[in-house]
Image (tube, helix red, strand yellow):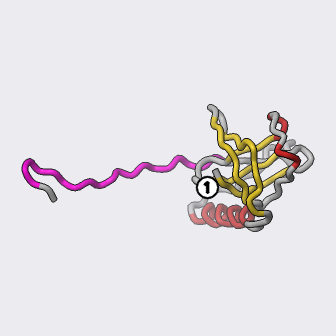
Amino acid sequence: MFGVVLWSDSSDRKAVIWCEDHGDLAYFSAADGELCDGIGLDAGDLVQFDLTEDRVMRRARNPRIVAEEQYPTLATRLQEANHMASEKVNIPPVSRPEGEEGSAIVLPFAPRRKTAKTRPCEIAGTTS
């Protein structure tokens, strides 16, 4: 899977990655036993990684940098787009719980709607 690092913490060796399939975000943590060969992931880096999913979240494993700083403004642009969309539908801005200063707030993406595929009508003995 390919993705773009939206947020990273070099001291804790953690990162949040926006995935190419536009599904839920993937989380990387070297604390999960990943060595990541000493690479430093920074916001905006284009990475390739193995994806695993459990009941709670998607995890990025074995990240490899494809291009550094490929999308340096992506996180900011997504935040701005969310702000603009929130204003249009009158959603109050997200605020941090009291006493949790500095904690990241991660919002899940809404599930995608499945669209029915249209198929040609089949009538006995005819095709369209």
Please, which residue is most extreme toward the left here?
125
Q: Position of residue 19 (x, y in %)?
A: 64, 52
Which of the 4 image quadrants contains residue 62?
Answer: top right
Q: Position of residue 103 (x, y in %)?
A: 83, 46
Give the side of residue 86 with respect to residue 28, left or right.
left
Asked if residue 28 is among those painted magenta in the image, a careful observer would answer no
Q: Position of residue 110 (x, y in %)?
A: 56, 49
Asked if residue 118 is among those painted magenta in the image, a careful observer would answer yes
Q: Is residue 101 visible?
A: no
Type of amino acid under label 1: Glu
Name which residue lies at 80% across and 34% down. Answer: 32
Q: Is residue 41 visible?
A: yes
Compare residues 93 and 39 and report the one nearer the observer.
39
Q: Position of residue 24 (x, y in %)?
A: 62, 47
Name which residue lies at 67% across and 54% down. Answer: 18
Please, which residue is most extreme toward the front here?
37
Q: Is residue 90 above or below residue 109?
A: below
Name which residue lies at 85% across and 51% down. Answer: 39
Q: Bounds of the magenta span?
A: 108-126
Q: Secondary structure at mark 1?
A: loop
Give the side of residue 114 with respect to residue 103, left or right.
left
Give the side of residue 46 with respect to residue 40, left or right.
left
Q: Quadrant of the C terminus?
A: bottom left
Q: Is residue 32 above or below residue 117?
A: above
Compare residues 77 and 37 and report the one nearer the observer.
37
Please, which residue is most extreme toward the right here?
11
Instruction: Report crowding for label 1: few under 14, some 14 to 19, many 20 or more residues within 10 A (C-alpha).
Output: few
Tell me which secondary structure the magenta stretch mostly adopts: loop
- The residue where tag 1 is placed is 20
Which of the 4 image quadrants contains residue 56?
Answer: top right
Compare residues 40 and 18 and report the one nearer the observer.
40
